[in-house]
Image (spheres, helix red, strand yellow):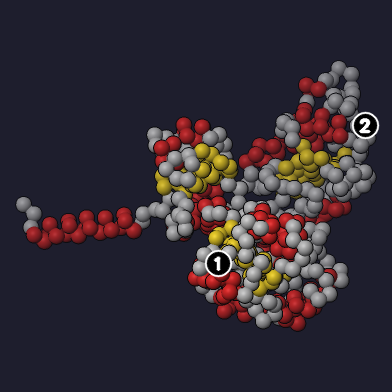
């Protein structure tokens, strides 16, 4: 028989386990084959992640997805997030043709609506799904509604109308329907119109947390109203002198663009964030009097890869580090320590083309007789853009298994074409070197053919990754006839055929 003390110990252990289990409860719903359809039909809108337990990308997404799920449950209206383990629940994953992990899909009223293709960070997921859950423009009924809407994070565009179905209101709604990353609201409330002193007006409001003495906190649209003119006005003024650039809106900033990376956090540290932003705005206010240039601040942790691509990784300290981008997709690194004077000097030097672009590059390789020529950022122009030779180049990543499988085949192609005086077979590690425009590297390996007389129009190879197919591709696209192969990739020597490859 157990003593009273032993019984109490058992009870305490059970209580601790129960409390511990409760503390680890997830905000993400779990769907299985047997109940997927029934559960997904319970929600007007839901985001579902299809994942594999062994997937590295899924593991990276997990904490962001969990964070987003918790925040979206508090949204008005709430938006649930769910997940499906594709190893255990094969039928559901096969049903939705899941071929890569994680797969994120948006369902509406029990039916697949579209794939989620936005950034996979909590902020982006929350913003995207919250906007999908509500109307594109929120109706404000009271002064309190207006105040609460203005006090939320982010810029806002508000329409103040005396007629709910007039031309201005209709045009405003059409524009609101076209934006997925901005907050729109409208009102016909006399209380709000009198409180704000806006009537039949469309106003772009700066985010409360970003209001500054360097610019107006509210801008009233005063042009000839049309969908196009209103969109142009919003796009021109939405970020102001210096916007908060994040993973969701980064592609909305126009170039030339100067980005300051530091510990940007308008929620937990607005004073520290605005301390540096105000210094950037002081320079921006002077520069924008002369020409259209955009300025932005970005969180260094959120954009660590971008900083690395601009040569800014590993710089320790509280001060911002700066990278500039021009209209030709070139990058410029600010070498000096940040100060108002140094920043102003750097901006003017970049705009006056007095700064060399930063090129991410490995060291220039020594001369080699290897059939595949190694290219780095600093040698890309001299090798790939050589106007005397056609170049077949593979962009790869060292960790990519598909690239590793391709390596012996690609080497064999180079060996077969080694005697061709007008052809170069090359490769470049695209994780350690910059691939310039117009090369788009969205996955590995990426293979392009650069004709010597049209270097600005490289041709993407999308055929089978077999020796005979790649040789045939080069033979067909070559500017000049090859010495050893005809236009179909067949050997010219008698007795040989395409299958010998």
Left or right position of 92 against 366: left
Q: Nearer the viewer, residue 134 or 459?
A: 134
Circle 2 residues within 10 Å: few <14, some 14–19, many ≥20: some
Query: Residue reaching furthest left?
Result: 1
Circle 1 residues within 10 Å: few <14, some 14–19, many ≥20: some
Across and down, in percent, residue 193 comes to 59, 71
Question: Which residue is pictured at 69% across the width and 46% down the height?
Answer: 442
Give the SS element for disc 2: loop
Closer to the observer: label 1 or label 2?
1
Asked whether the beta carbons under mark 1 and mark 2 sit within 8 Å of each other, the answer is no
- Picture quarter with the C terminus: top right
Question: Which residue is pictured at 72% across the width and 50% down the height?
Answer: 430
Above or below, 184 against 462 in this view is below
From the image, tell me which residue sits under label 2.
481
Q: Nearer the viewer, residue 417 or 141?
A: 141
Give the SS element for disc 1: loop
- Does residue 324 appear in the picture of this structure? no
Tell me the quarter of the picture where residue 179 sits.
bottom right
Left or right position of 479 against 326: right
| Residue 55: mark | none
Tell me the quarter of the picture where residue 325 sits.
bottom right
Tell me the quarter of the picture where residue 152 sits.
bottom right
Across and down, in percent, residue 23 comes to 34, 58
Instruction: Please tell me which of labels 1 and 2 falls first in the chain.
Output: 1
| Residue 189: mark | 1
Across and down, in percent, residue 17 comes to 26, 56
Left or right position of 87 against 135: left
């Amino acid at each position: 028989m157990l003593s009273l003390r032993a019984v109490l110990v058992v009870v305490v252990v059970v209580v601790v386990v129960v409390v511990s289990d409760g503390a680890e409860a997830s905000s993400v719903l779990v769907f299985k084959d047997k109940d997927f359809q029934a559960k997904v039909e319970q929600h007007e809108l839901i985001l579902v992640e299809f994942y594999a337990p062994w997937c590295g990308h899924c593991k990276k997404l997990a904490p962001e997805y969990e964070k987003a799920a918790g925040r979206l449950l508090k949204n008005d209206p709430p938006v649930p997030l769910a997940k499906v383990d594709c190893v255990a629940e094969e039928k559901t994953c096969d049903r939705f043709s899941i071929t890569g992990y994680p797969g994120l899909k948006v369902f509406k009223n029990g039916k697949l609506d579209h794939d989620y293709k936005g950034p996979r960070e909590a902020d982006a997921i929350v913003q995207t799904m919250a906007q999908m859950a509500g109307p594109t423009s929120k109706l404000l009924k009271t002064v309190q509604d207006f105040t609460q809407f203005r006090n939320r994070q982010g810029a806002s565009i508000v329409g103040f109308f005396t007629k709910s179905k007039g031309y201005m209101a209709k045009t405003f709604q059409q524009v609101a329907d076209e934006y997925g990353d901005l907050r729109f609201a409208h009102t016909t409330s006399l209380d709000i119109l009198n409180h704000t002193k806006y009537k039949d007006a469309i106003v772009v409001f700066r985010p409360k947390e970003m209001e500054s003495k360097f610019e107006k906190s509210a801008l009233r649209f005063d042009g000839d109203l049309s969908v196009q003119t209103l969109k142009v006005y919003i796009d021109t003024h939405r970020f102001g002198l210096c916007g908060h650039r994040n993973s969701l809106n980064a592609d909305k900033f126009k170039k030339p663009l100067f980005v300051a990376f530091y510990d940007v956090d308008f929620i937990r540290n607005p004073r520290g964030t605005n301390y540096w932003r105000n210094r950037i705005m002081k320079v921006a206010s002077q520069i924008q009097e002369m020409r259209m240039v955009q300025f932005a601040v970005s969180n260094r942790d959120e954009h660590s890869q971008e900083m690395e691509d601009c040569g800014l990784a590993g710089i320790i300290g509280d001060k911002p580090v700066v990278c500039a981008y021009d209209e030709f997709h070139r990058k410029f690194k600010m070498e000096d320590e940040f100060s108002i004077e140094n920043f102003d000097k750097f901006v003017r030097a970049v705009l006056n083309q007095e700064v060399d672009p930063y090129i991410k590059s490995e060291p220039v390789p020594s001369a080699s007789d290897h059939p595949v020529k190694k290219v780095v950022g600093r040698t890309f122009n001299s090798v790939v853009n050589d106007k005397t030779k056609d170049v077949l180049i593979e962009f790869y990543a060292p960790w990519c298994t598909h690239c590793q499988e391709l390596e012996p085949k690609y080497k064999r192609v180079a060996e077969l074409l080694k005697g061709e005086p007008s052809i170069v077979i090359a490769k470049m590690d695209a994780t350690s070197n910059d691939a310039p425009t117009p090369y788009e590297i969205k996955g590995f390996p990426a293979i392009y053919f650069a004709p010597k007389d049209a270097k600005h129009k490289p041709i993407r190879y999308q055929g089978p990754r077999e020796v005979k197919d790649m040789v045939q591709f080069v033979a067909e696209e070559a500017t000049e006839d090859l010495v050893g192969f005809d236009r179909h990739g067949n050997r010219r020597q008698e007795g040989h055929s395409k299958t010998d490859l």
